Every structure is written in C-alpha cells, then in structure tokens.
Amino acid sequence: MSDDVTPPVLELVSVTKTYQVKQGMFAKPKPLHALNGVSLKLNRKDVLGLVGESGCGKSTLAKILLGLEMPSEGQVLVDGKEITAGERRVLARRIQPVFQDPYSSLNPRKSIEDIIALPLVVHGVGDSASRAQSVTKMLDLVGLPARVRRGYPNQLSGGQRQRVAIARALIMNPEIVICDEPTSALDVSVQSQILNLLGDLRDELGLTYLFISHNLAVVEHLATRVAVMYLGQVVEEAPSQALFANPRHPYTQALLDSVLTPDPSLSVPETYLGAAYPNPISPPSGCRFHPRCAQLKDICRSMPPPHILGPDGHVDCHLYAAATTQ
Amino acid sequence: MKTRLLVGSVAAVLAFSGSNALADKANDTLNVAFTKELESVDSYFNSAREGVIFQRSVWDGLLYLNQETGEYEGNLATSWQWVDDTTLELKLREGVKFHNGEEFDADDVVYTVNFVAKPENGVVVQRNVNWMKEAVKVDKYTVRIITNGPFPAAFEYLAGPVSIYPNEYYAEAGPAGMALKPVGTGPYQVESVEPGKHFVLKRYEGYHDSPKGAASIGTVDIRTIPDVNTQLAELFSGGLDFIWGVPADQAEKIAAMGRFTVANESTMRIGYLELDAAGRSGDHPITKAKVRQAIAHAIDRQAIVDSLLKGKSKVVHSACFPTQFGCEQDVTTYDYDPEKAKALLAEAGYPDGFSVDFYAYRDRPYAEAMLSYLAKVGIQANLKYLQYSALRDMRFKGETSMSFQTWGSYSVNDASAITSQFFKHGAEDFARDDEVLAWLNAADTSVDPAVRKENYSEALKKIADQAYWVPLFSYNSNYVFTQDAEFTPTPDEVVRFFQVSWKQ
Amino acid sequence: MPGSIRASGWGEAMARTIETVAEEIRSPSPGAMLRRRIFGHYGLVFGIAVLTIIVLIALFAPLLTSHDPYTQDLMARMKPPFWMAGHDPDHLLGTDHLGRDYLARLLYGARISLAIGAVAALISGLIGTAMGVAAGYFGGKVDLVVTFLINVRLAMPVVLVALAVVAILGGSLEVVIVVLGLLLWDRFAVVMRSSVMQVRDLEYVNAAKAIGCSVPRIVLSEIMPNVLNNLIVVATLEMAHAILLEAALSFLGLGVQPPTPSWGLMISEGKQMMLFEPWLIAIPGVALFILVLAINLLGDGLRDVTAPENRG
Amino acid sequence: MDDPILSVRHLTIDIPLAQGTMHAVRGIGFDLKRGETLCIVGESGSGKSLTSLAIMGLLSKKLRQKAEKLQFAGLDLRNQTPRMMRGLRGDRMAMIFQEPMTSLNPAYTIGDQLEEAYLLHRKAGKAEARARAVELLGKVGITAAESRLSQYPHQLSGGLRQRVMIAMALMCEPELIIADEPTTALDVTIQAQILRLLSDLQREMNMAMILVTHDLGIVARIADKVAVMYAGEVVEQGTAAEIFDNPRHPYTRGLLRCIPVPGKTKPGERLGSIPGIVPSLVGNFQGCAFRGRCDVAEPICSEMVPVQEEGQEHMWRCIHAAGEGASEGVSQGVRP
Amino acid sequence: MLAFALKRLGLAVLVTLTVSLVSFSLLFMSGDPASAIAGENASATDIEAIRTLYGFDRPFLVQYTDWLFSALRGDFGQSYYFKLPVADLIADRLSTTMLLGICGISFALLTAVPLGVAAAVRPNSFIDRLALFLSVMGQAMPSFWFGLVLIVIFSINLGLLPPSGSSSWKNFVMPTVVLGYYAMPAIMRLTRAGMLEVLNADYIRTARAKGASEWRVMFKHALRNAVVPVVSLAAVQMGFMLGGSIVVESIFALHGAGYLAWESIARNDLPTVQALILIFSLFYIVFTFLSDLANAWLDPRIRVG
C-alpha cells in the first residue's frame, strides 16, 4: 500500500482547527482545539473508519475535508497537491458527502431530480437532457425506481432518502465519499440495506470512503482501516482487522469493550471509563486520556504520549513507549 | 426627573379618588374647553386665540372698546389725550387692586410698557407692542406713552392686547412666573394653572368698577380638549357647558337637537388665496394677471360659503374684512364663471391649464373644495397640507406659488392690520407692488382719516384689479352652550367669560 | 452497471422495495399537501376570498361605479347611504362632506390602502429580508451589526418617528409609503434572521456547500425556498400593519393628503361628523377592518398550514 | 410461582387521524414478574413507546386505548381515576425517557426536581427529601452529590443527566420501572455505563423493568424476556436465549441478520436485509403485517396469523413453525 | 449574571446613543427651528436674530454633542413653544402616559395570559376559538376607530364613562381598554404558542411521570418556561404602548407625553420632540433591559453560565 509512486488520494498533514470560544464579556475568548495535529492518509478504495465519542472532532474533520471549514494549521492534500481556500469547487468535484440525517440533508422544497442533479447544475456539467439521463442512471444505481424523480423528500422513507443522498454524492463521479454517520438515524433493517449499497458501490465504482461512525460493529464490518479519535487527536490508527483483533490504546480497548454484541450469554460490560468526557476547552495535561485510563502511569499526567509507529499505523500511548525504546 | 416622575404618578393615582367636578349651574361652574394647548398664559407670550380669551378675563387694558357702540371707554385709564403725534397722556383709575393685593398705579403701566416694548424681552406678537417706544410716569396716576411715530390705531391696541401687569410681581416672577401664576386686575383671578392642560378661574370679588362689568359666574373651569368630537362628546355627556369654534355642520345638527343654545357670530377672520404674482417662487403661470383672474373666476365662493361655512359668513371681494376702517368695498369683483376662467387661461397661453402646488394649513375641506373647482377649469392643484409654522417658513422664503391663507387681524378693526401687513414688501408680500406700497405707507402714517381712507382705497382697488389675492370669504364662529347659560357672541371672536351668566 | 446488484441474492427483494416505493409515492407532493391544507382552513379561505374581492374591486373600481371619486357637489353634501331615510338612489353609500360619491371613494380607496400595504411591505420586506438573511447566514459580526440595528429600530417609537418625518416632508402618498417602508422592516429582519439560522445548519445546506454551490445560490435556491413561508406570513402581517399605520397617521392629520380617497383619510374626515352621521366613519372603518382582518387571517392561515403544529 | 407484577392482555391503541384511524398498537400482551427485565424491541413506528406510555397512563387523551387486562400489582389500571394514577406514577411505577437533554425542566435545579419526585408521594419534609436525593445521586454514581443538587440541568453532561433521571425515577423505590430508549442519545461508552447501572439497581432493588429499545445488542445483554414488536403487534416473545438462539418469526430472524456481529459476520460481507417498509396501519388491517416484506410469505398470510407456542414462554405469530422454510434464499444466519 | 447584565447595559447605552443621533439628525434636517421659536406673526429679521441667538447656525455635530451632554445632565433645553424646560414639561406629562401604559399592559396581560393558557390547554375548544376571535379582532381594529366607537357607546349612549380628561379612575377605563387591546393579541398568541410548545416538551412528560397533578404540571413546570418569551414581549409592547399612546391620548384628551409629542411635532417644537423620542426609546430600552434581567432570572440557562 505504501507505494511511493502513487500518492494517497487524500492526505491530512498535521491539521489543526482552533475555534475561539467566548467565555463572557470581559474574559478573553479561549481557544478550543477541535482538531489537534491530525494526520491521516486515504489510499484508493480504502474505507477509513473514524470512531470516537461525540465532541472528539470527527465532524470537524469531515467539514474540513468537504471544504466547509478551513484548517487553522496544516495541509489537506488531494493526490499529493495541497488544497487552498480558493479551491473549494475543486474539492467539491472529488469529495462528496453523505450526511447522518436523511431528513435534513435533502431540501424539502426541491424535487428528487433537482436534488440529485444539483451538483451537475452547479458545475455546469451537460445540458438538461444529459442531466436527466444522469439522474436516471444514478437512481438505478442506488436502487430507486425512475418515477421517484418527480417526488419530493417528504414522500420517501428514511432509507430511500439516504439513497437519494448517495445518488447526489455520486453523480459527479467523485473519488472520495465522506460518510458522516450515514446509518445512525435509520432502523436496523434499513441500515443493512444502505451498508450493502455502500459496499457494492465501492466495489463497482472504486470509491474511497471516510466512514465516520460511533457504531463499532458497523465500522468493523465495512472499514479497511480505522482511526480512533480522542479530544481532537488520532490516538490509534491501524488496519481494521489488526485493530479489532489487537486494540493497543487503552481508549480503543475501552471502546471495544463497550460494544454490545447481541449475545445473550454475556452481560453489560464494565468499561472503566469512569470520569466524564473532558471539556475540550481545558483538556487534561499530559496524555489527554489519562483521567479515564485504566492503565494510568505517573508519566501520563505530565508528558504527552509519544507517537509510536507500528507496521501499518500508529498508537499514541506511553504504554508502548517502553516497549519500543527497550 | 425620576423622582418627580414618581411623585407625579403617585399624585395621578391619588387624583383617582377625586371625582369629576360636575359642571353646572348648581355649583356655579362654567366648564369650557380650549382646542389648543396654550403655550403660556402670559398674554404677551402666546399668540393664540385662547390666549386672547384668557387675557380678557384675567387682565385689563387701559381702555375698553364697547362692542355695541364701537366707542372706546376708560378701563384702567379714566381719560386720555394726544399731547402730540407721538405722545399719549392717560389719567389712571385710582383704587384698583391686583389679584395679589398689589395696588395699581402709574408704576405698573410704566413697567409693563417699558418691558414689552423692548424687543429683546421677546414679546411674541411684536406688532401688538412695537408701536410703543416707552412709557413715562408723570405722577402716581398719570402716565405718558411715547410711540414710534404717529400711530392712529393706538387706542385699538390699548383696548386690546396691551394688558397692564403688576410691576413688583412681574419684576420678580417674570414671564415664567406669570405663566404659572398669573396676576392681573381682571374680572377673574386665576386659581390654578396646569400648563397647556387645565386652568381654573374664580370670580375676582374685588373687581373695580370697569366698563367690562363684574363676572357673573363664580368659577370657570377650562380644559384643553383638542378634538372637536371629544368636546362634543363631553358636551353631550355633561362634562362641558360651553364650547365654541364648532364647525357649521355640527352646529346645525346640535341646533336641531334642541338641547343646547347655538349662537353664530361672524368673525374678523377672512380667508384668501395668496398668489405669487411677483414670481418669488420662480417663473410660473401665476405671475400672469390673467391666470390669477382666471383662478378668481374659477372658484364658486358663494357655494363654499353656503355649503361649508354657513352662518354669518359672507363672500369678500376686497383684501380686508369689510367692517375694517379703510376697507374699500367698491373694487373689481370676480363672479363664479368657469367658462370665463377657461377663456382667460387660454388667453394667458394655458388653454389646457397647468399644474401647481397648492398649500394650506387649515380648513382642509375648504381647500379641497377649491381644488375641485380649479380642476374643473383645468388647473391641476396638488394640495400640500402643512403645519402653520412650516408653511409660514416656506412663505417667508418665497417658496409657495399659491396658498390658502386666513387672517384675523387680531380683531383690530382697521385695514392697517391686514392690508398693510401683507402688501408692504415684507416677507409675506407676494405682490411686491411699489404703487401699493406707497399708498399703504401714506395711509398707515397719516392721522387724517380721509387721507387714510383714500389711500387704502387706491391700494385695495389695485390689489383687486391685479388679483394679487383672491379674497374668499369671512369666517364665522359657532358657540354652543347649555341652555342654562346666557351669552351673546361678539364679532371679534373673543369669548368674554365675565359676560356669560346663568339664566334666571 | 447495476448488473452486479441485480445478480446478487437480494435482487428480488430489491424489486419488492421498488414496488413499495411505488405505493409510497402516492403520498402527495408538498404543493398538493399545501393545497389540501389551505382548503381545510376556513380562516385562510375567508381571508383569500375577501382579499381577492378587495383586489378585484381595486382593479375594476371604474367599472363598478360611474362616479368619479374626486368630483364634488357642494349642493349634495352628506347624503345618507341607502339604508337610511332620505338617501339618493344615485349615491348608494351617500356622499361625503364635499358631496363626493362615498361608494366611489370607497372603491378607489381600496387601491390606496392596498398600494400602501403592498408597497410598504415590499420596501420593508426587501430591507428586512436582506438584513435578516445576511445576519442569519453569515452570523458573527454581520449578525452583531444587524441585531444592533434591529434594536435601534425597535427602540424608536414608530408612530412618533413616522409623524415627525411626515411632518417634515409633507404627507404625500409616496412619502407615507416610503416612511412606512423604511420603518417596518424590523419584524422581517427578526423573523428572517432566526429562520435562516435554523435552516443554515441543516445538512442539505452543508451538502450544497460541499457540492460547491456559491453563496448566492445557497441563499436563493437552498435557503430562501425553505423560509419563504415565514417571509410571506410576515409580509401579510406587515401589510396589515402598514395599512393600519397609514390610517392612524391620516387620522392624526399627518398621513396621505386629500383629495386622495384613502380609507384612513375618509375616517379622519368623517370623524368630524361622527356623532351625527356615524355612517361616515362606520363605512370606511368597517372596510378597513375587513381588509385588515382578511390580510391577517390570510397570514395566520398561511402560518397554520405551513407549520400546522405552531399556530400561535 | 409468584404473581406477575404487571399483566397486560390484548392492549390496543388507536390514533384518530384525518385520513382515518391508525391502529398503532394491536392487541399485545405480556406478563412481568418482580425482578424481571422485559425488553420490548422493534423499529420506529412499531408501537413500543406507546405501549410503555399506556402502562404509565400517560397517553394523550386523544388516543383511544383499550385492554382486556391491564393489571399492576393487583390493581386494575383500566379503572383507576386520574388521581389514583398520579398516586401510582413516580411512586410505585416510574419512567426514564430517551432524551436526557430535554427531559429535565431547565428552570429548576436538579435538587428541586429530585425532591419533587419524593415530596409528591411521601409525607416528608424538605430535609428528608434532600437527604434521599443525595443518597440516590450517590447510588447512581454521581460524586459530590450535595453540590450537584443546586445545579441546573444545562450544567450537566448527557450521561450525568441520564443518571439524574434514573435517580429521579428511583426516589420512591418503585416496583416497576419503564425505560424508553434510555441510552439512544448517549455515546457508546456512556451507554454501557448507564445500562450497567440500570441492571445493577434493578437487581438490587428487585424491581420489574421494561426496557424499550431498537438495539438488539442491548436486548441480548440485559433482557430476561424479550417481546419483538412489529407494526403494533408482538410478533415473537420469549426468553432472551430463545429469541437470540432460536428465533422463529421471519421478522426476528431478519433483524438478527441485518446487524453485523463482530467475530461472526465476515467484514465486507453482504448483510441480510428486510426489504420494503412497514405497512400503513391506518384503516382496517387483516392478516400478517409482515407478509409484504417476508421471504416466506404465502397467500394465506393475508388472511390469518396463528399464534404458535413452544415451551412455556416462547410464542410467535406466524404460519410457519420453528424456522420452517426460513433459511431458503437467505444466506446468513446469526449462528454458524 | 453580572457579566450578562453589564453586557446588556453596554448594548442598551449604545442603542440609546444611536437612537439619539438618528432622531437628532432627523430633526436637524427638518428645517429651521428658529421660525418655530418665533411663533406666529414673527418677522423674517426676528427669526434671523433667534437663529444666531440659539446657535442654529453651528455645525451639526457641535449642536448634537452640546445637546447630548446637556441631556445627560437631564437638561433637554427649553420648549420652543411653552418656553419651559423640556424636562419639567415631560416629567409633568409622563405620569399620565406611564399610568396609562401600566394600566394598558396590565389589562393586556390580565386578559391575554389566562386566555392564552386556557387556549393552549384546550386547543380547538370554545375558549381557544374565543381567544383567537378576540385576538383577530384586536389586530384588525384600528385603535382610533375603536376609541371613537367606545366613546359613542359608553359616553354618549350609556353615559357611563367620561369621554375625556384624567381626573378620576373612570377616565382611564376606555383608554386602558383601547391601549391594552392593542397589545393583547400578540401576548395572547405568544402565551398560547409558548404553552403549546412547552406542554409538548419532554420535561412535562417527566413531570407527569412523577405523578404531578395537571395543575402543578401546568403552573409549576409549563408556565414558568412559557412565560419567558412573554415577559420579553410584554416589555416590548409596553415600550410600543408608550410610543403608541399618541392616538389614544389625542382621542381621549389625556394630556400625556404622547399627546405632547403629537402637538410638539405639529408645532415644530424640536427640543420637545427630540427629548420625547429619546425618552420613549429609553423606556423601550429600559423595559427590554429589565425583561432580559427578569428572563435571566427565570431561565437559569442564561443566569448560570
């Protein structure tokens, strides 16, 4: 995979996003590091699963990739070339989103055809006849009947809406699709349909996904690689199988422990994540995870953890620092 | 201010417990309404009709004009004579006391005259006082008034707007104090003043033996009620006993009801169209005499009088009120003749008429009626209805080509109070006729009635010929009052409360 | 291309999905649903009907009466309307204080009131919407400035300022319309600001951004259609507000100038005789009341049918 | 064998709509004993939340509710006056809702709201209520309970709020607790904590619990008994082991095939799915509601749905007996 | 809370300054005040003298700052018309308007809130329809017309209430009703909408699940939250009412600040008009400021960081 000839389709190089949060009239606004030096690579046909609790920066990352926000520091590279603020439209042709809530991601006042064709209109692709043709093709591709095109979002079920959203995302033939919790608002029976569809489309169109989800079972099922985020940082990244088989970071372990598989022989697990998720405005010192860590060492309180590269991925944790230095 | 506010609110709440003073003969109170908020009750510092009414009841002049005989009688003065063209010597009445007990003598006259004659003291209506140079005390009960040049109308003013103030009190209180607690020698003394809102007058028991006569009704309670309808509503529900200035239509209806006495009397006010003959507002059709004459022919003044003004109103033809001294009646008249008006317009080069701004500040229906008549002969007049002061501003600057004006001559029965006001090249003169100016100057400064009359006549004839003005009609006033009261209105439009009495 | 999907095991299931979709699509489109709701709402139907009638009256006033609203006849003043004794069959609603046909003035007056309402609402709508949308969409400093301006505007007493301005400029129809238009934008700004803020964060707006839509396109084509219902509701209410304010200004003598047959002016003129000829204010008063009522019912109704759960 | 604390028979709930009556809950029934946990599982619109509200007597008056039997601790809930129901609610039966962010009144402190739950049912003073509140906050794992009492809901995180909600429900030691999707709005890590807390407390206090959820993972881990709801009906009911190890109804089986199970489903493999959508419940409905989406439907399914039973506890509504014909055409099962 | 109050206060001051600047410049453009001071019948030279005496020939900003700093000391100059200090004049008139405003808003609140609550508790019931009917009527009824109709009925026909004046409580009945009815519909609708929304809130269900009685649910849990926007609206309406009392005061001949404003505009009495615009604005600003504080007190989300 780490072929030096073809650069990754998408690469983030120590991306930081800082918001200024007001604390009252006289207090100075404090910086909130929604992303803190995040580096990620996506190769063609990768499915990168991004997991973490709410507030960890997953959605900010998605917004940066979609060009909805610009990073405060760091670079976004597409095919090895940096994307600057002025190039949002370039980004738009290559990276497309599928959002979480199929009820708010489609404009209720527009017909399905208009919604799906919008990217073509915006980028001035084709005339109305060829657009209509593309729409027909996309509807077929995502498994919706052609007559849906005259309908409106309110006439469709949640699963059907999500199919429309996928059709819209794919009509420009993008390389990368950012799926931000695409099934979390859907019933399980519909979720599986969408997951299957996403899988099929990836095979068929050679798509690359960034798949954001809090559902680890779904991530494990779909992702080829997984990045675990905690407080704006990627604390562990590894190929999916390796990570699920052998989680290294205590946070990843805790996350995996929390997964409730439908096995009636087991009871509810103890996750040891006793303390609450910290306030990102004043993150803990040292290792940011230390207040909740079950394997806390003294050094974790004061020293930020080292960035330890593995064979294919990395983990940021003092636990493994000793192992490598030894 | 905050505390005062609070106190005010509390006072207003407490006032709830008091009841509405019921108006009637039984408790000897006459409830009347002013339409306008009186800016100040100090008679030298307001210019409103309400002020004149108030002044006549609270203060006295040196002379008094008998409304029935038209003769001047002594009031605070007992005799008077011209020493020379500019010096008038008056003997004063003895034993008169002001409402506050201060004794009336020459010092009061001297102080008052010298105060008001000084322009920097800012008397609002300067023409009421600026003819006087000063007053000189001869002895305790004799004064001389020195005028700025010969001034034939002096008695008119001394019997009218020039009221005599108590020198000691006025020196101390000044106009501001006088406005809050007025002190005079008149038939009524002021019991309370809420500026602009509410005034209560009480009969002055120590009133001297004046030709005005002592007041008959014990209390006069004056409230300011701006809206005629509200005044009528109050009248009907018993809250008021006496109102005036009631429009003709309403007066007719009230008379038909039979519950109230409706009296009509003409006033000295006339309405007229002021036309910019001199072209001060620019070059426009109205500078042409034929156009002005056309306008005069276009308006059916008789119909307006018959339908809208009614009562004792009359069409006027001359630029003054007919009873005024020097008001020549034998002038060119313009009948209602739309065809002739059209012909004149055609002759002047406007066969299809023209468009013009038409300014007015009062009596909107009359203005509208005229608009409609003008439209019939092809003159498209656009009504601009402004506040008086705003319109006057524009007129001073010479920006109005045509406006509907009225003038009441301060009830001064002399043409100098109107014709000379508007045709002596002042800011309000839109004719700028040198000949007229010369005639008026001659008329105004002569002490010989014949000379004056002749000169006024010449001037008025030319004004009519040239149609510098279109004199329209004289106004009238309707007085409506409870049948318990007795009152005879006078043509000077001044309500003299001391002449109102209860029917026996 | 979708061959692989068809070939897969659940091709049949997919076919059934499509059947269900076909059934499901029978649920009506937003437009059809709106139409259905509109006709189930009596207030709205009444409002639309009355307003339509008034608009038609305004448009076809010359066909409805042979009288000219400006022609006076001083000999035939204040003739009573048809239901009173002594009426003149030629003047169905009688004549006013200058002998002008009251019906003609009433009919032509509809034009004035509608024009004032519509144009003032249009002007204020443009200003308020622009400000509200800018504040709602961009937020941050733009929002701060707009919110501040809204506060300033709200702090200024409308009637007082309108009176002062009309007194300064003179009351022509144009001045009154412009003054009202410049004063009544606050509600537009407030409502548009909050509606746009709500819509701004919805995902389809993010989707449009991610697609590469320009800001004008996002605002005009993604956001505006979804806040349009609120805009229309405010516009109707402000139209009613403007009509009432004009009437109040005219009543206080600082509104539209005669001989313009404005209803407010008719009330103001008729007020003089209201204790004796109450019909003089009753007729234009009722007309004004009905017009404002109809517009308000229309606005309320639109609010109800576009957001049925939020009647209030 | 002790009597069930809650016994429901043929409960129906109708919602009058403009287009007609919607039969949202259609004749469901179950029994629940002290110390037992019943999970009602189903997709959105299956009627599971309505059922829980009906038991609490919290359904809007506009909805029509009928039951052959609705008995709680020997009381017939059908003929309790509103006043008597109020006496039961919060005292002997309590409820926890889905959205901890909006389920607490923003205008009052945590303490006020906790104490209110106690004071409404106990003749006790403020001090006693306060002590009880502190005690329960400690029990649900909130540290520094005293200082939390004066805080407002918006000052707490979602997980803490849900703990407060649980504490509030337990103030009067209820015999029955109904938790309606109590962890749906929470992060996975918090979800596990909250569920663990709930099941520990339930055991400790020997309460009966109804847990309403759509998450089969939760059901498997926490339930003694499971009721699977589809389109207003309980289509299958049984012990957790029976439901997961030996599902009988095609819908249950379909659901289980839909979810990827780590270690069991192969990554990237096609998941099972239930095509189509839930039928409209407006108007009269006959036959099996699932037949439109069922792989093994037969013409007769549009006419009748027999209730089949196996053992004492396991029941399902389908013409097919134990998995008969169910494996055809669908490749993945839960069990290898 | 303190920071919140200070921030709001800062905003209020800024708004006040802007309003004062706007109103001052508005009236600055209105032409020559000298002629207004001169009164009727003044000559052109009189007016010129007054112009220099009063300093109307100075630059705009100089006049504005001058005025502003005097205003800060409570000195709004002299009324051109009454020749009295404007501050005294307004203080005198304001009590009537305040009283009217307080009566009006009380009337509006006392009718609107119960009606709104009742309508929300029983949607589509008779009381809901009555409330809607009253509010629709109130919104469509021109207040001057309503006032005139009341006078005809209660003063002329029935003789129950005096048509004008301010000497007894009876005088305030009709103005209160007219003014209050103007504000009633908006408050009623907001109360109703707020109650409906709050009654659907999750925490209301929580309260019911605790076994709280309907009464307790309604008044302790629902109204407390629904009343928050109503307080704001009432403050706004109160501000509007004081400004909007012009019409009512002129009909019922109440010599309040509104009537003074109207007359002062007609008389071109600039210092009075300027002061009144500023004071009406100030009232609005103060009321909204107080309502924000009240809301912060009612809503801990604002009060407690």
Image (cartoon, rainbow, N blue to C red):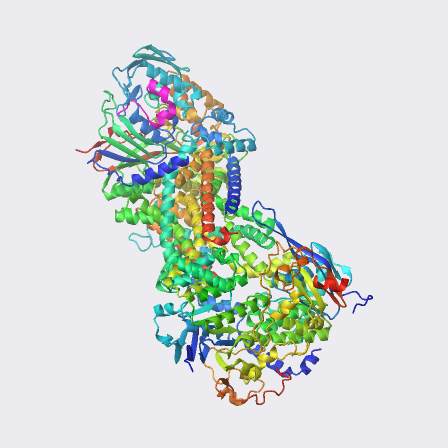
Residue B174 magenta-drawn?
yes
Using residue B93 as the reference point, say whether residue A168 is left or right of it.
right
From this view, report whether residue D233 is shown above or below residue B428. Answer: below
Q: Nearer the viewer, residue C134 or E226?
A: E226
| Res D157 seen here | yes
Quadrant location of residue B178? Answer: top left
Q: Which of A109 and B83 is in front in this view?
A: A109
Query: Picture coordinates of residue A174 (x, y %)?
Result: 71, 67
Q: Position of residue E40 (x, y in %)?
A: 42, 29
Q: Which of the 4 quarters of the picture holds residue A296? A: bottom right
Asked where in the image residue E93 lies, by quadrant, the reply is top left
> Which residue: 55% across, 34% down?
B283
Q: Give the range drawn in magenta.
A: B165-187
Image quadrant where one finds the C terminus of chain A: bottom right
Residue at 37% of width from left, 45% of height from top?
A: E102
| Above or below: residue E35 compared with residue C75 | above
User: Horizontal and vertical percent for residue D262?
Assistant: 64, 76
Q: Nearer the viewer, residue C110 or E192?
A: E192
Q: Please identify the dominant SS of the magenta region.
A: helix
